[in-house]
Image: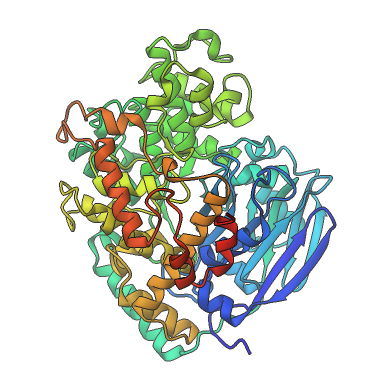
Amino acid sequence: MFNYGGYAGRLLYINLSTKEIQIEKLCKEFAEDYIGGNGFGAKLLFDMVPAGVDPLGPDNVLIFTVGPLQGTGLPAVSSRSAIITKSPLTGFFIDSYFGGQFGAELKYAGYDALVISGKSPNPVYIWVDDDKVELRDASHLWGLKTFETQIKLKREIGDENIAVAVIGPSGENQSLISCTISGVRAAGRGGTGAILGSKNLKAIALRGSHDVKVTDIMEAQGLMRKLNEKIRSNPGTGVGLPSIGTIGVVNVVNNLGILGTNNWQTEFFHDAVKIGPESAKEFILKHDTCFCCSIACGKLTKTKKQEYFGASTIGPEYETLWSFGSNCGVNDIEAIILADRLCDEYGIDTISLGTVIAFVMECYEKGLINEKFFEGISGTSPVFGNKTAMLQMVKLAAVRKGVGDKLVKGVKRLAEEIGKDSERFAIHAKGLEIPAHSARGIPGMAVGYATSNRGGSHQDGRPTAERIGLVDINQIKGKGYFQVDVQRMTTIADCFINCRMTESILGIEGITQDYADLINIVTGMNKSINDLITVADRVYALERAFNIREGASRKDDTIPYRFTHEPIPDGPSKGKYLSEDVLNNLVDEVYEKRGYDKETGAPTKETLKNLKLDFVIDELYKD
């Protein structure tokens, strides 16, 4: 009998080809072994998507999951959702997360996961109202932008309080860097929007009326008070994020000399003050928060100059200020606000798009491509610092026209097409564009990017402990071992689906007792820290096994040539970089601690057995 708190206890399966809808009960052992969120998604994806499946074909699956904390009302851990699928951008495992209301509402509707397969012959949206599950025509919504789609859906259903996840034209056009939008939040990475578009799925709308029960209500209330006190007393969650959000990171990182500038040719942006908190404050209208979160890190900003049409957005977040700002050499924060708004409306990943734009700017300045490459760009030159060219490319990418059709392929594919050694400054890992955290200035991030299962992401390995001085940022040896502890923490956080903003109050350097207390009080399980480490290792190894089954190997556990051969040329971190030999030593540390084969990068048979992943052995060791 399934009697754990925190779970809805059911999984919802929808086949868009056959229109078949199934509901399965959640297995107790499944919950114990994989917890939820990313863990549920990794197991379902491995089981349902065999090697070689076309990510944009009907046989790929799209999995929306929640963890046991969603809908409980616990602060900062109750709202987020995950999307897990095979990425059309990388061809590997991808998990992408978003805040807002969707995760709690999926739980209230009575489900711990929504698993979507097949392909509809015509545009549809999914309507889930507790036990009533319907596929409805979406032809009248096809072609609409994300915010307009959400407004129309809420009016059509007659309830402004439903939760909705949608794609915009970018997803419909199957852009490889398109994303999924819910409210004002984005599941940004890996091309999830293209998966919905390939299935002719415009949106998912949810409404639920079920309660989420916790095992020990008195302990849960005490935990809520404890979390709120930690949030208030922490300088980041209590002061920095509520006042200025992640915008404040711009100054911190630039002062360290590790803010990627002009496609990471340098890492110090002389105009950082123009895109940082000092300038942003002028444009902030109000603070925004996710469901049941007291941090309120979101900032509603609005442009003032007439040329930017009064554009408003929740953000821009630090990553977007970097991607369209310093990385493109642009110092106009209003231009960045407009670029962010366009990406949200059309449904496109700001990290990936800004990276690709910076890449082609460098290619142009180096003479590797000429004006003919930039079809649709008029009256301006695509050089660093040119906000007009940047915005024109954003607009063209959003509708996949002119040069925009090239940009949305992602930087890895584009570099392969351009050639001429442009691959050396194509900034990605495993095909996913690397975000705004220096691999040269933060050694842990170098090995974190290299060994991340999703590729160029700062959500597996984390920069925080090194950046704020908890761990020596200049120490290199041992950072592979250290990042395994961090990856274990982030994996468990993704099984719970905690926001990364909680890492400073729950534990930055690894899994702490606070994580165990969260799961035990809510569910009634009796998980120790070591138990959670085992779950984290199981999930991470399963993700890795999925990638290896798709052809990944040790050769893919690397970072761009620029980061291993070109020292930072100036600024406070001048001279820093990690050579290939040093990086390989750190990767060895990861493999050693995880029990992976140092030649292939695969979990050994012994490791798989110890993690209760015996079913993976035949998949990886067929010979």
| Corner quadrant of residue 176 | top right
Determine if residue 184 is in view.
no
In front of the other: 374 or 305: 374
Answer above or below: position of 150 versus 103.
above
**Measuring 44% from the left and 75% from the top, which residue is drawn there?**
74
Q: Position of residue 55 (x, y in %)?
A: 65, 44
Is residue 574 positioned above or below 200 on the image? above
State left or right for residue 542 relative to residue 521: right
Q: Is residue 332 above or below residue 139?
A: above
Q: Position of residue 85 (x, y in %)?
A: 60, 52
**Residue drawn at (54%, 35%), measured in percent from left and top?**
342
Number of labels in the image equals 0
**Residue 537 in the image: x percent, y percent?**
42, 66
Relative depth, front residue between 82 and 134:
82
Q: Give the answer, above or below, for where 150 lies relative to 277.
A: below
Q: Most extreme residue toward the front, as rendered? A: 623
Image quarter (top left, top right, bottom left or bottom right) of the N terminus: bottom right
Q: Which of 556 and 350 lies nearest the eye of the viewer?
A: 556
Across and down, in percent, residue 186 comes to 53, 49
Colouring convention used in this rendered image of the protein: rainbow
Q: Quadrant of the C terminus?
A: bottom right
> Does residue 394 appear anywhere in the picture?
yes
